[in-house]
Image (cartoon, rainbow, N blue to C red):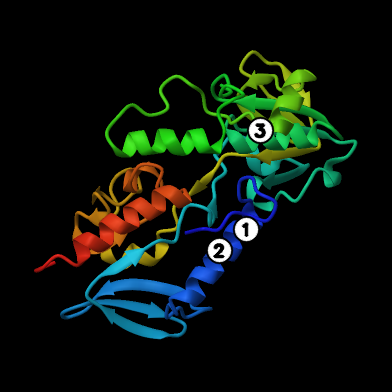
Amino acid sequence: MMPAPPGGGSPGATDTVAYLADYEQRYQLPIIRPATVHAVRRGEQRLLVDTDAGTWQARHVISATGTWWRPYVPYYPGIGGFQGEQSHTAGYRGPEPFRGRRVVIVGGANSGAQILADVSTVADTTWVTLRPPRLLPDEVDGRALFTLATRRAQGADGMGPLGDIVAVPPVREARDRGALKAQPMFSRITPTGVTWRDGTGLDCDVIIWCTGFRPALGHLAPLRLRGPDGLIPVDGTRAVGEPRLHLLGYGDWTGPASATLIGASRTARDTVTEILKPNT
């Protein structure tokens, strides 16, 4: 079990990393790092995993490369001609580089709200979203979200109409000082800013794209499994087109809340159980 953090309370990021490192050492897991996987392909009898540390033959492959490796920036007309700076959540390191500048923040989920809360303390910010952002009630924290994820895994209702954005303290503070106000999504990017369909324009120095990521699936391209939506169809975690391949941790399409630690644990347990069944 994960030990309680020093001083009590809920574990933070540092506690979680330390626990995972201790877990690896305790069970002497045969982890090879660094090893970049270039391709997973079909061999005569087994799957072949090509890496810069060698090639492995495998009866089963679990792909768990996650959803945080490929930053996604949507296309808008004029995006290539913008003369200011464009960045993405993936490269955000704090508000100081934006001090005194005019910043447009794009995205109505947690990263957009949290970066807005941060940057709005030092810059002139405008928040734009595709849909009106919805904050969760203040009392709903990470533990409550894990409870909801458990209910979803058990087939009960999920988030429902609660909202999308966790009201962590910086977001609540930004809301209380009136900074958490969103504009509709712009329709075009100009060399000096953005414009909306009604012709309204706004000059800005920076656009921060808080628009999420796409699953890192390039190593599975030789298997030719992707569907029209760019994802690999799965039954549970097993790839429909290649039963020796399982996908873990890519979001709800590979299991409820599977991109979280608690969700990954559940789907990993189920996947291992399935792999160990006779004749699989």
| Residue 243 visible in rendering | no
At x 58%, y 57%, the residue is 16
Residue kind at label 2, given as amino acid type: Tyr
Q: Which residue lies most toward the left here?
A: 279
Residue kind at label 1, given as amino acid type: Asp
- Counting from the top left corner in percent of width and height, residue 278 is at 10, 68
Q: Could you give the CA–CA distance between mark 2 and mark 3, rounded to whole angstroms?
A: 24 Å
Residue labelled with disc 3 = 168
- Counting from the top left corner in percent of width and height, residue 180 is at 71, 22
Q: Establish if 61 lies above or below 144.
A: below
Residue kind at label 3, given as amino acid type: Val
Say whether residue 37 is left or right of residue 198. Answer: left
Residue labelled with disc 1 = 15
Residue labelled with disc 2 = 19
Q: Could you give the CA–CA distance between mark 2 and mark 1, rounded to whole angstroms?
A: 6 Å
- Counting from the top left corner in percent of width and height, residue 120 is at 80, 31
Secondary structure, mark 2, is helix
